[in-house]
Image (cartoon, coloured by chain):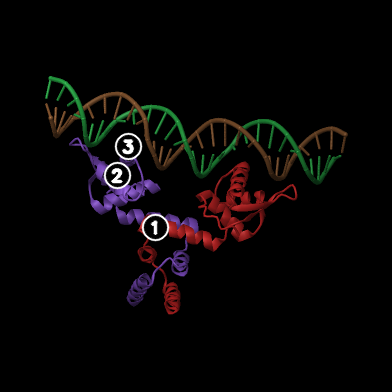
Chain colours: A red, B purple, C green, D brown
DNA sequence: TTTATTATACGAAACACTTCGTAATACGAA
DNA sequence: TTCGTATTACGAAGTGTTTCGTATAATAAA
């Protein structure tokens, strides 16, 4: 996987998510997945994926006529970087501010809270 | 406060944060605060704030020569909406996925972890 | 009053992102 | 081979954001 520091756009992230979920895919398949959610012409999707290839967000196998695209950035690293950027720009870098807002506004279930608390304890033991 | 559903841009959010922190402010003051962090010409800041006024993100008092701008959207509501959008686009709508990622990838310090754990315990006791 | 300073208004350029029309090409079917 | 379809390539238009130069107006200083 590439370790480029590029921040994908909204549209690119949608496509990356499809590639992460489905593995290497043709433009046709990605476009069909996208069209389950929104209207978008085939050539629009194609163009976006070509640009993603140029940017290094995706790579493609051009061996056969139908090019097969794969994500070239890892899901975890990408989301972690997006989260970091979001925390910095919206919550002045404070992860706890964000978590409080997230937990406060979405009424997490008791099971979710337990799960999260367990994770926190695990992390604290490591520090 | 206005309840318009407008999503501020990155630059607009920076300015809103200054207005939230400092209260009603002149363009000059906002520009000075911005310039502590980044280079940006005065007229650029002015233009952004004029646009924010047009969009309803800010209002201004034009009574005296130096116009005084105030945020016209609440900090909590705005951040909550931004968070919701971010969770939807990046974490498929799952707040706990986001929290896990925030806690798991060095996005939170030990102090923040303690803070969050305390919050969770408080929430659990309420249930 | 004259000059210098400070502020706003306006418009345009630069940039990035999204969208799609059209052309060229490869492939498969008749 | 010929025709229709699927695919990629290319370029340009539309939109939104950011940036700033210049003009105009108001105020303060001399």
What element does badge 3 sit on?
A: helix
The answer to whether tags 3 and 2 share a subunit is yes
Please tell me how crowded label 2 is: few (under 14), some (14-19), or many (20+) other residues with Cα within 10 Å. many
What element does badge 1 sit on?
A: helix
Vertical placement of residue B71 versus A126, above or below? above
The residue that disc 2 covers is: B31
Vertical placement of residue A25 versus B114, above or below? above
The answer to whether tags 1 and 3 share a subunit is no
Q: Write the residue at 59% across / 45% down.
A: A51
User: CA gap, disc 1 to disc 3?
Assistant: 26 Å
Residue B16 horizontal/vertical position (percent):
31, 49
Q: Does the image show residue B7?
A: no
Direction from residue C1 to residue A12 in the image, left or right: right
Q: Quadrant of the C terminus of chain A?
A: bottom left
Q: Write the residue at 65% across / 49% down.
A: A27
Q: Does the image show residue A126?
A: yes
User: CA gap, disc 2 to disc 1?
Assistant: 20 Å
The residue that disc 1 covers is: A88
The residue that disc 3 covers is: B43
């Amino acid at each position: 996987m590439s370790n480029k520091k590029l921040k994908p756009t909204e549209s690119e992230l949608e496509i990356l998510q499809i590639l992460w979920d489905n593995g290497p895919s043709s433009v046709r398949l990605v476009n069909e997945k996208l069209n389950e959610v929104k209207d978008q012409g085939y050539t629009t999707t194609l163009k976006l994926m070509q640009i993603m290839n140029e940017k290094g967000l995706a790579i493609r196998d051009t061996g056969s006529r139908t090019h097969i695209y794969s994500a070239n950035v890892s899901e975890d690293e990408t989301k972690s970087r997006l989260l970091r950027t979001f925390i910095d720009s919206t919550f002045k870098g404070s992860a706890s501010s964000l978590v409080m807002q997230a937990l406060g506004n979405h009424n997490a279930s008791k099971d979710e809270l337990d799960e999260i608390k367990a994770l926190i304890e695990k992390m604290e033991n490591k520090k």
